[in-house]
Image (cartoon, rainbow, N blue to C red):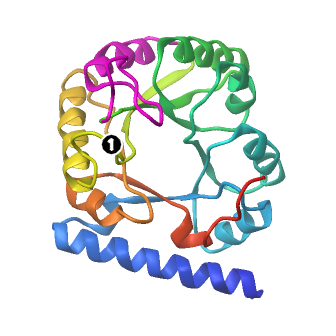
Amino acid sequence: MTDRKTELAGNLAHVEQRIARACAAAGRRREEVTLIVVTKTYPASDVRFLSELGVRHVAENRDQDAAPKAAACADLSLEWHFVGQLQTNKVRSVVGYADVVQSIDRARLVTALSKEAARAGREVGCLIQVALDADATGRGERGGVAPDGIEELADLVAGSPGLRLDGLMTVAPLTGEYAGREQAAFERLMDLSTDLRRVHPAATMVSAGMSADLEQAVAAGATHVRVGTAVLGVRPRLG
């Protein structure tokens, strides 16, 4: 193995141990939690190494980085997740490679995604991004919709051609009542997921937790964790 592949293998093994321990502590089976490796700012060569090491889910947050990387790795058996705030003028490009968009937070974005997915003959999975730090505008610091906006958006996604409602996503808030209370934030997301599944039973995905707080997410019941730094290392600063 190359030095980089060896480094990634070691990091991946450590993250797997963390997830396994968290699952055991929560009385959950390891297979209940899917690892998504966030590869933003890292090259396609790292994605290839990760694929060789058994990773099947990768995530990106900027289309200008993701589109060429996904094209370079089109021969790999991977599921691509888009996790960043998505502008409608990037939707056509994102629909070209993303299997799941985890950052649905407004009706206009749903409409644009549906139009492009239908045009491309694709079905794109969608997660409603929940802002647990939403202000008076109903939006969070890093995007997302307030909890009281979930139902309307979920119904819109579920009724839109080319889209599939998969569940909910959140990022632990840095401000507001859940600041510094990651597990409480993720438990709140699980309560919202329970409410959603009463109306949309197939929307079972709950994406929460990153490198620093994946244990709290697993303890709360998350089905997917999004880990970047703990697998790939500290990211180079973007220019």
Q: Quadrant of the N terminus?
A: bottom right
Where 68 falls versus 12 (above or below)?
Answer: above
Left or right? Give the position of 165 relative to 148: right
Q: Quadrant of residue 210?
A: bottom left
Q: Is residue 140 magenta?
A: yes
Residue range highlighted in magenta:
133-160
Q: Position of residue 102 (x, y in %)?
A: 49, 37
Q: Is residue 143 magenta?
A: yes
Say whether residue 204 is visible. yes
Left or right? Give the position of 56 relative to 49: left
> What is the crowding at mark 1: few (fewer than 14 residues within 10 Å), some, or many (at least 20)?
few
Where 108 falls versus 198 (above or below)?
Answer: above
Marks counted in the figure total 1
Say whether residue 126 is visible. no
Q: Position of residue 208 (x, y in %)?
A: 36, 50
Question: According to the image, label 1 marks what residue?
Answer: 175
x 62%, y 74%: residue: 53
